[in-house]
Image (spheres, helix red, strand yellow):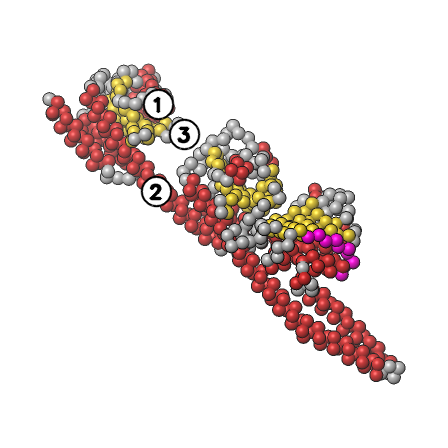
Amino acid sequence: MSQEIRAYELVALKEIAEMLNSTNDMNQMLDDVLVKLLEVTGFTTGWIFMTDNRSEKLCAASHALPQGLNANDQQVMCGTECWCLQSYMQNKLHHAVNIIECSRITYAITHSLGDTEGISHHATVPLKAGTDSFGLLNVAQTGKVHFSEEELALLEAIAYQIGTAIKRIRLYQLQEQHAVHYAKLGNVIQSINAVQDINQLPLQAVKHIGDTFHWQHVSLFMYEQQQLSLRAHYTNNQLNKEWLSLAIDEGGPVSTAFSENRLVALANCEQVPYKSLSSIGIPPFLSAVAVPLRIRSRSIGVLFLSSQLPHQFDDYQDDFMYSLGDHFTLSVENLRVYEQRRELALMEERNRMARDLHDSVIQKVFSLSFLAKGAETVLAGKEPIVERSLQEIRQLSQEALKEMRTLIWQLRPAGLEHGLLTALKKYGNSMEIVVYEQVEGVRELPRAIEEAFWRIGQEALNNVKKHADTNVVYIRLVKSEQLASLEIRDKGRGFSPEKRKGKRTMGMLSMRERAETLGGELMIQSGKGQPTIVKATIPIASDTDTWDEE
């Protein structure tokens, strides 16, 4: 008899194994395996509960349920707690067991939901594959109140096969899902790489990411001036450009991701308020991911994704999120290299124009002035009208000469080859500003940085002349192995940052953009009745690291 049972078990397992390997559709597999299981075992009915790490319970498949258990769209199967599920969720159910009194069946009978067809007991067995657990397999038979040890052993073997099939299908589905995610990532990268303006990159990046993945909220933080600056955020298809600052230790998951240079994921944070994030416009969220933006394993900012729904990002692997952040920073770095090359090309063109103006136009205008002066001398007192005309020609030519020299100065400041501070001091003196200069460090600055400092200093001196009500300025240039900084401090009347918030002038934006194009930052500090300080800090590129900081 035992040999007959053993042969029967092997046939049943073989048939079920063949069926389990025939599809990668989870629902179809579960439905088919129940049909085959009841067919080869002779049991009357069966159902499968699937659970996951979110503690959700679902009657994922059933076959030949009696009317009492099938009533109201299987409400009793999905909504009523029972001993087998409670034990399973508490990790107390490890083997196939007899359920003497099923609370679901009792509930159906008590509430007269329909005929239970003589089913009062059932067997239940965990669905496992190795250390992974997926749910419960349940079978019952009309009039059967006890399942033998052989039957329970067979059910355990079948449940293991089902568990293995579930794991295989989930891995297959996960690979398909990842393929879709990375295909979308490719589209995002292509869109971001098409952005040619580095100042538009943060805004366009969050838009492309939000639109492609249909995420509710995407925001971009960059590290500057010892704070995390919210540069852009995308919320429910609305795009906003911001310049709001967040203290380095007050941003919850954003601060953790930046400080520890690691991914921070929150599946369901309903009980954790983040007032500091709300204060700068980040909407409330239940799930979120903070992705560090890394350059050579060093964090320079954070990409923050959030949703008002829980578990919104559970299906995205850490490697995918890191790839999203790394590709963004690569786009930033590539665009900055492009901007540096463009600046160098513009600088070369300005130098060429300055040389041409000096060698041709300046000489001709000077010759015109010289000839007019000579003609005046020859006609002195003889032709008053002609003499006055010559005087006007000489005066206009001298004014043109002066304006031309100023233009050449702006294109290629005379004396820059002798040092940045020398050029800035001469420029300040030309506007009757007394400049006191100080330099620390002897390293030669790259041409792009020197040019950026010259333009920033020029704009800062212009602002002093126009707004500061002072003619005294202190300029400090500091050069180290990794950083160069230029600080312009006046003795003026200052201004209130609160009143000027959101009212950045073109000059201020131009100074900031020049610093950021080279991977640096600009700080403007002032107060009513206090000195104004403009400080630009730019990393000095080397062969191995173009973004080094202190």
Query: CA–CA distance between discs 3 and 1?
Result: 15 Å
Q: What residue would you read off at disc 2?
A: 175
Q: Is 493 inside the magenta-drawn segment?
A: no
The residue lying at 53 percent from left, 36 percent from top is 256
User: In the image, is residue 166 above or below residue 434?
Assistant: above
Q: Determine which of the numbered discs, if any, sits on residue 54 in the image.
A: 3
Residue 38, position as x, y percentages in the image: 21, 28
Label ID, residue 91? 1
Badge 3 amino acid? Arg
Which residue is nearer to you in this view: 510 or 215?
510
Image position, residue 78 (x, y; %): 35, 25
- Specify start and end residues of the magenta stretch as a single range: 430-439
Q: What element carries label 2?
A: helix
Category of crowding for the residue at label 3, using alpha-carbon neighbours closer than 10 angstroms: few (below 14), some (14–19), many (at least 20): few
* Secondary structure that dominates the magenta span: strand
Dividing the image into 4 quarters, which one contains the C terminus? top right
